[in-house]
Image (cartoon, helix red, strand yellow):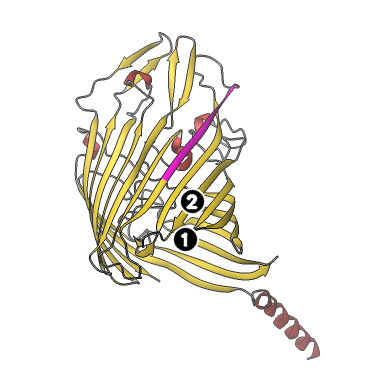
Amino acid sequence: MKKHAFFAVVLVALLALPAMGLAQTEFSLGGYLKLESFWDSKAIPKNINLPPAVLGDRNATHGRFNMTAQSSRFNFTIKGPKLWGATITGFLEVDFDVQGDDRQSASHAYQPRLRHAFFRMNWPGTELLFGQYWSFFSEFYPELVQDGPFQGHGCATHRLPQIRVTQEFGMGPGKLTLSGLIGKPTDTNDSGNLNYPISNSPLEGQTSETPQLQAKIQYEADLWGKAGFYGRPRGFVAQVAGGWQRSRYRTDDRIGPLTDQQEYLNNWVIQGTLFIPVIPTTTANLAGTSALTVQAYVGQGLDFIGNGTGMNHILHFHPNRVDRHLVKTWGGYVQANYYFSNQWFLNVAAGLGSNYDVDTYTDVAASTRPVHHWWEVSPALYYRPISAVKFGLQYTYTRANYYRMSTYNPATGAISEFNPPTNWGDAHSVRFGAWFFF
């Protein structure tokens, strides 16, 4: 009997240990449930993150209707103990915005996807963050019905494992923020260039010997009042961010046995953002207010921040060598909103991504047609009767202009040209979204 009592006491003590360790930790659940319904004039992805097919493509000439709840997500916020005078907060977020396989259906569960997983330590005016979180290029998302708005043609969709430090300084009526991060480099070339000997399926993060570096400077102030950004009053914001990484490529071997040689190219980007209250308010009431958001970027090899036209690099062919160049791209977006009331508001956004260093199609050697520039215009009407529920109805027009297609013959050094009847494609879309926030 004493033996059983002893084991019972030990078991209770062991079960109590986790509770004792979590006594200073608080958990809260958040996220939203989302239904998207959409009709597209062409078969384009749900998030419109690939350009519309060229006119005459028989695989993409029909309309389609679809509905999905896979963009629903949930998160945990964890408030931890203090350390070195800092408050520790953790955040974990998961969604299901990934298709599993060809058998995907409404009754076949979508795959969970890790979006964010980080914790931060906060002192007065200073923050230190460890984990996976947004980059500095994704902090001002346009408010659209689809997820990943303007991904590839106006606004970066980029999360990365990182160590980030942020310092705030009071400056007049507002605050100046300086931030920097060191993060995981993004693979910017295909698996054929990885040349990774351990596995037939090359591991992610094997194409750079340097980390990805980003920096940001931002000034935010209530100078003449605030206006709505995602339903919350916000003052004037001016932000400049920059990023860089050095990517490794295996030298192209179509000219000869060059597989042991390496090329190192520099991916970089500079981005500026303005949020301007046009018709401001000095209270929490957004009725009658209006705001303008303007974002512009320029850089090269922009796959490293999830932006650009999808044409990260090009090959220039010569009789005895191949030169690889990162494609230079510029773009951005403009967004304007107007709140008829605190429940009804109109939002109009337009985004663009365009290459500017490839002058003619003979610079491009590809088996598929690369995009020269790609843009989208999306007006949307939203109704948010309570803070927990939101509805949106949106029309979208997107268009892409393609380079003409060309291929290279290494035996003769000749470039063969193709002249299809058109070099552009477009698509129309009507989308309805319904969110329940918790």
Q: Which residues are magenta?
A: 260-272
Q: Earlier in the sequence, mark 1 or mark 2?
A: 1
Q: Main secondary structure of the magenta part?
A: strand
Amino acid type, mark 2 = Gln
Q: Where, by quadrant of the figure, is residue 318 drawn?
A: top left
Cα gap from disc 1 to disc 2, whole angstroms: 14 Å
Q: Is residue 262 magenta?
A: yes
Contact, mark 1 vs mark 2 (Cβ under 8 Å)? no
- Disc 1: which residue: 173
Q: Is residue 72 visible?
A: yes
Q: Where, by quadrant of the figure, is residue 79 drawn?
A: bottom right
Tell me the quadrant of the picture where the C terminus can be found: bottom left
In front here: 389 or 113? 389
Label 2 Cα crowd, 10 Å radius (few <14 / some 14-19 / many 20+): some
In front here: 8 or 137? 137
- Disc 2: which residue: 218
